[in-house]
Amino acid sequence: QKEVEQNSGPLSVPEGAIASLNCTYSDRVSQSFFWYRQYSGKSPELIMSIYSNGDKEDGRFTAQLNKASQYVSLLIRDSQPSDSATYLCAVNFISGYSTLTFGKGTMLLVSP
Amino acid sequence: KAGVTQTPRYLIKTRGQQVTLSCSPISGHRSVSWYQQTPGQGLQFLFEYFSETQRNKGNFPGRFSGRQFSNSRSEMNVSTLELGDSALYLCASSIGTSGSSDTQYFGPGTRLTVL
């Protein structure tokens, strides 16, 4: 059974701080990894994708991938109250198919 | 470019009834995936359609079915509804030919309540 694990939180950080969200997955051969943000009552919104070991930066967001440790993380710099949401880690375990396995998400709360 | 659309947005049904949900993908996208989201189980994959063919299927009972039309629009059907089918049903579209890097974009979802 291929699984994606996330700490459910909530992770509480003050405004302006760095929020660090972590995700582990069970299959060493997985190739693609995604972070989605979901506001309460809304659908998931893509933040970033990452496919290679190392860091990938997009604005205030940095995704980090370590395939040897089966670990992917998302850093949010200069956190804002509007970043308060649930962050979902998703892994495509099956090459050639558009099928994502999601973690249950980490709730992030950014206090002013 | 218009995003993924889903209809209806809200549905209330009673046990034993059946329901059909619709999804229109982003223009040019040929893959449509369906997910069920509940507070307890999170987001779970139902099935994926590509070029009118079911390409992959999750671990759900046969009461859950779907199809895709030639214009890539997709429908999913749930027959003999149970209370546990109450959930947010999400449709995601992607190009479908990008292999493992295929990126999915979600629609707003259909909130189904079974009474």
Image (cartoon, grey):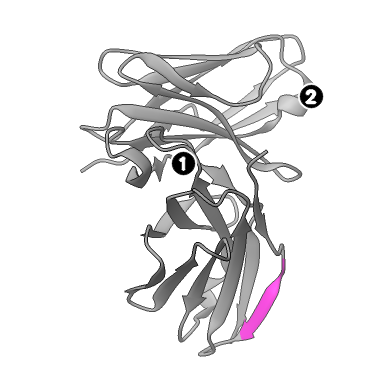
Tag 2: amino acid: Leu
* Picture quadrant where residue B69 is located: top left
Dot 1 corresponds to which residue?
B108
The first of marks 2 and 1 along the sequence is 2
Magenta segment boundaries in residue numbering: A9-13
* Main SS of residues in magenta: strand
Tag shown at residue B83: 2
> Is B113 situated left or right of B51 in this image?
right
B17 over A45 or under it: above or below: above
Check disc 1: other Cα within 10 Å, few if <14, some if 14-19, many if 20+. Answer: many
Q: Residue at x 50, y 82 (%)?
A: A79
Q: Look at the numbered disc 1 and give the secondary structure of its residue.
A: loop
x and y, in percent, of residue B49 in the image: 40, 22
Q: Residue at x 75, y 9 (%)?
A: B16
Q: Chain of mark 1?
A: B
x and y, in percent, of residue A95 in the image: 41, 38
**Residue situated in front as seen by the camera: A33 or B61:** A33
* Picture quadrant where residue B63 is located: top right
Residue A20 in sight from this viewpoint? yes
Residue A43 in sight from this viewpoint? no
x and y, in percent, of residue B51 in the image: 30, 18
* Picture quadrant where residue B3 is located: top left
Tag 1: amino acid: Pro
